[in-house]
Amino acid sequence: MQGAVKYIRIARAILLMIKLTAPSGKVTIDREERDRARRYNRQKEQLFLIGLLISWVAGALFVFSGLAASVRRSATKLAGRGIKGQSLAVVFYSLLSWVFSLPLSFYSGYILEHRYHLSHEKIPSWLWDHVKGLGLGLGLEVPGANLAYAVIRRWPRAWWVILTGLSLPFTVLLAQLFPVLIAPLFNKYEPVRDEQLVERLKALAAKSGIHVASVMQMDMSRRTKKANAFFAGLGPTKRIVLADTLIENFTPEEIEVIVAHEMGHQVHRDIWRGIAIGTLFTFAGSYTLNRIARFILRRFGGKIGTTSLDNVATLPLLGWILSFVGIVLMPIQNAYSRYIEREADTYALDLTKDPESFASAMERLAALNLSDPNPPALVKYVLHSHPPIIDRVDHAREYARDHGLPVPEPMQPY
């Protein structure tokens, strides 16, 4: 999307991965690797801003030139009026958005990842994942849009309240279905082969009062060298999921504290807290969306091609407005997210009493994922949903001092 890209980098850039082949001892990151991490993250952030600006400008042109209304009319000619024409218009809008965003997605998610030796995925695999994502998105967007416009027509004044209410059970249902139906479309899941590790994590879960259906591993290494761990599902579908890259590159103690952090989210019911907070944000966003959309349609309906909110031609307009609302709300949402992540860190330290492994796990994650442990303050407060790694290591050191435990070495700032 942005200029020509060099595919061949200096061979010593792979030193970052070589340092992680033996998952024991303290992680050391030299100046060159720190500079690489900084460059990688700044480029990611720049691409995010570029993509945002492009989408705002292109969205405005698409909506206010009347092109969105023209697409709606074309869909009506092909499929007729009613739900068929409306559904085809949603498909057209989704396809146009997907094609338009594909070049920047490719640059950010493929070229940049390969440039920094974080991915070895081939282009066909990358593209196939995005095609599957498009298909899954259409499967949700078409019925979702039809339901939304039916609600708008039936309750033109209160539609935003009703749709906010409907979003709650939909979110819960999606959380139930994700580990069973959606996640396997993109990764292979299988039981963790290391029985000792499984028993160790199940014992940790039992200590936390959490019932775990299974401990699974996913083939994250098929695409990337990054690592991750998470809980998936609710109720009887709840499972611990470890990336195979995590199992390969981290010690059992480090894996334990990482999983203990995720258990903190479970014990604190952060999923439900997140759904509740998300519903409040959805309520505020929907109210704002309704007011702004009606104002724009009254003032610029002639250019847009419709003055009626219940016309599916307004779908790109609604998406365009929501992108602005989302950016305004993002710092607030991220501040709340950083707060609950800090709580989960404290829970992991309370549960394991192992601040040394916690600190080394954080540093190893930073090295493996090429994270910036100490980002600029503006970037942190606006874009980061987790505390910076250096803050999390300092938190572990403070915890160790307060509880008379061995104090990890400080992490050097970039």
Image (cartoon, grey):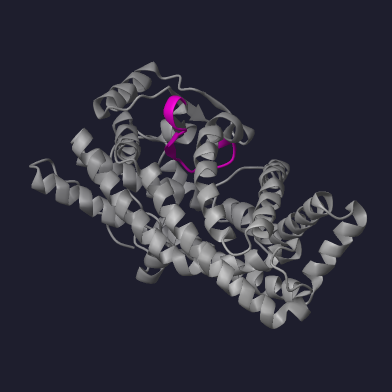
| Residue 45 in view (yes/no) | no
Work out whether residue 224 or residue 75 is closer to the camera in this orientation and state it. 75
Quarter of the rendering containing residue 214: top left
Residue 182 placed where, x, y %? Answer: 60, 35
Q: Is residue 16 above or below residue 255?
A: below
Quarter of the rendering containing residue 329: bottom left
Q: Is residue 13 left or right of residue 197?
A: right
Work out whether residue 37 or residue 77 is closer to the camera in this orientation and state it. 77
Work out whether residue 330 or residue 403 is closer to the camera in this orientation and state it. 330
Q: Name the residue at 27% across, 56% down.
A: 391
Q: Is residue 118 left or right of residue 352?
A: right
Residue 414 placed where, x, y %? Answer: 34, 63
Q: Name the residue at 65% across, 59% down.
A: 152
Q: What is the residue that sits farthest to the right in this orientation?
A: 77
Q: Name the residue at 51% across, 64% down.
A: 285
Say whether residue 266 is magenta.
no
Q: What is the residue that sits farthest to the bottom in this orientation?
A: 299
Q: Is residue 37 above or below residue 2?
A: above
Work out whether residue 339 or residue 215 is closer to the camera in this orientation and state it. 339
Residue 269 placed where, x, y %? Answer: 34, 40
Per the rendered image, the range of residues in magenta is: 221-236
Residue 169 placed where, x, y %? Answer: 51, 42
Q: Name the residue at 48% across, 31% down.
A: 244
Q: Is residue 222 above or below residue 397?
A: above
